Image (cartoon, grey):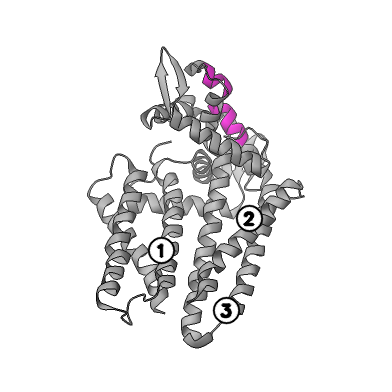
């Protein structure tokens, strides 16, 4: 284990971030999801190149393989964390609410907050995002699940809730 | 392979302890408790290994160099952060995932916007989150008006900057 082994996933993540930011700034076709996917692949390529550069050495192939697997997991973990951080910035209710309050230093009543951000607004926004990414479809005014990823994520979250809390749903 | 095992084992151990604690009693401030459990398990595993190495010298079954300990720490920190982010969706249901589950349960019939709104009301989706802001001291309620506290203003500024850097213009939420 040397400095290159230690920092390889960080450099790979930096490459991922740099490409994502460049694509977002250039208003690339495909939007956020495409920028995230391309950034992830770019980081993975950078990690592969750095791993090849530092492969083997005195420690041998088995040790090097362990480092490569661990660094791959660190890179995926960093990319996953950043993906969720961006998601929070864009979709989290708490973030939307504090941003609304920030733009009104004198404060807002509950009614005023609901005029700016209601359940109807939220559902409209989220249905729009799910439709845009092909996760759901609208037919005759009714919404249907269509994408596999949202179903898979929902099942994983239900599984985690059952495992940890013994309940399928918790609290909205 | 010792390093890979030392990367993964403390994280798995922390998750098992977290699971055991939650089975006994789910803490009130869950996210904070998850962080504390993972921090304690880091000290109990990696910290203990470091003390052993410092006291008795390098051993084959322990990480031995500073780079290896830094690697184990980086791995642990990244996995903990990823888990804490994921846990936020376990603690409080995401409206998008709830909508997905409702649509999954509805099957081929699907659901209309009105049917979604019958369950996902202002009270359920917004008012409880506003109350959480007060509980978590990000906002205060005085004379019927909600105002940001310093902590809430810091969060708002952080995400405003992030959105600026990312070029996000949509209102979001």
- For the point 65% across and 69% down, the residue is A45
> Does label 2 lie on the same chain as label 1?
no
Circle 3 sits in a helix, a strand or a loop, which is it? loop
Q: Which residue lies most toward the top here?
A: B143
Q: Which residue is identified by label 1?
A: B73
Q: Which residue is identified by label 3?
A: A54
Q: Which residue lies most toward the left here?
A: B24
Q: Chain of mark 3?
A: A
> Does label 3 lie on the same chain as label 2?
yes
Q: Chain of mark 1?
A: B
Residue A53 located left or right of residue B60: right
Gap between marks 3 and 1, in whole Å? 21 Å
Q: Which residue is identified by label 2?
A: A17
Badge 3: few (under 14), some or many (20 or more) residues near its Cα, within 10 Å? some
Expressed as whole percent of the image width and height from the top left, the position of residue A93 reads 51, 34
Residue in the foreground of this view, choosing between A37 and B103? A37
């Amino acid at each position: 284990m040397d400095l290159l082994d230690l920092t390889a996933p960080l450099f790979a993540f930096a490459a991922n971030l740099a490409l994502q930011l460049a694509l977002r700034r250039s208003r690339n076709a495909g939007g956020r999801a495409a920028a995230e996917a391309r950034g992830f692949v770019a980081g993975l390529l950078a990690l592969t190149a750095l791993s090849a550069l530092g492969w083997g050495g005195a420690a041998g192939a088995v040790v090097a393989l362990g480092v490569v697997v661990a660094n791959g997991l660190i890179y995926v973990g960093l990319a996953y964390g950043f993906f969720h951080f961006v998601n929070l910035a864009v979709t989290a209710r708490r973030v939307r609410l504090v941003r609304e309050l920030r733009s009104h230093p004198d404060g807002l009543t509950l009614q005023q907050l609901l005029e700016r951000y209601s359940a109807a607004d939220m559902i409209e926004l989220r249905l729009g995002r799910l439709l845009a990414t092909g996760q759901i479809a609208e037919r005759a005014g009714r919404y249907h699940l269509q994408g596999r990823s949202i179903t898979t994520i929902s099942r994983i979250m239900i599984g985690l809730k059952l495992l940890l809390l013994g309940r399928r749903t918790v609290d909205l | 392979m010792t390093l890979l095992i030392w990367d993964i084992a403390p994280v798995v151990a922390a998750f098992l302890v977290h699971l055991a604690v939650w089975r006994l009693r789910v803490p009130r401030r869950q996210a904070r408790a998850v962080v504390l459990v993972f921090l304690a398990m880091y000290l109990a595993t990696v910290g203990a290994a470091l003390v052993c190495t410092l006291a008795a010298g390098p051993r084959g079954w322990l990480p031995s160099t500073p780079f290896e300990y830094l690697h184990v720490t980086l791995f642990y920190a990244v996995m903990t952060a990823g888990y804490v982010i994921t846990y936020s969706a376990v603690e409080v249901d995401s409206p998008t995932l709830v909508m997905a589950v409702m649509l999954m349960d509805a099957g081929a019939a699907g659901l209309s916007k009105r049917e979604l709104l019958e369950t996902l009301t202002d009270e359920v989706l917004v008012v409880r989150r506003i109350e959480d802001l007060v509980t978590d001291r990000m906002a205060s309620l005085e004379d019927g008006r909600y105002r940001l506290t310093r902590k809430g203003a810091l969060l708002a500024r952080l995400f405003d900057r992030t959105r600026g850097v990312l070029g996000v213009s949509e209102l979001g939420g």
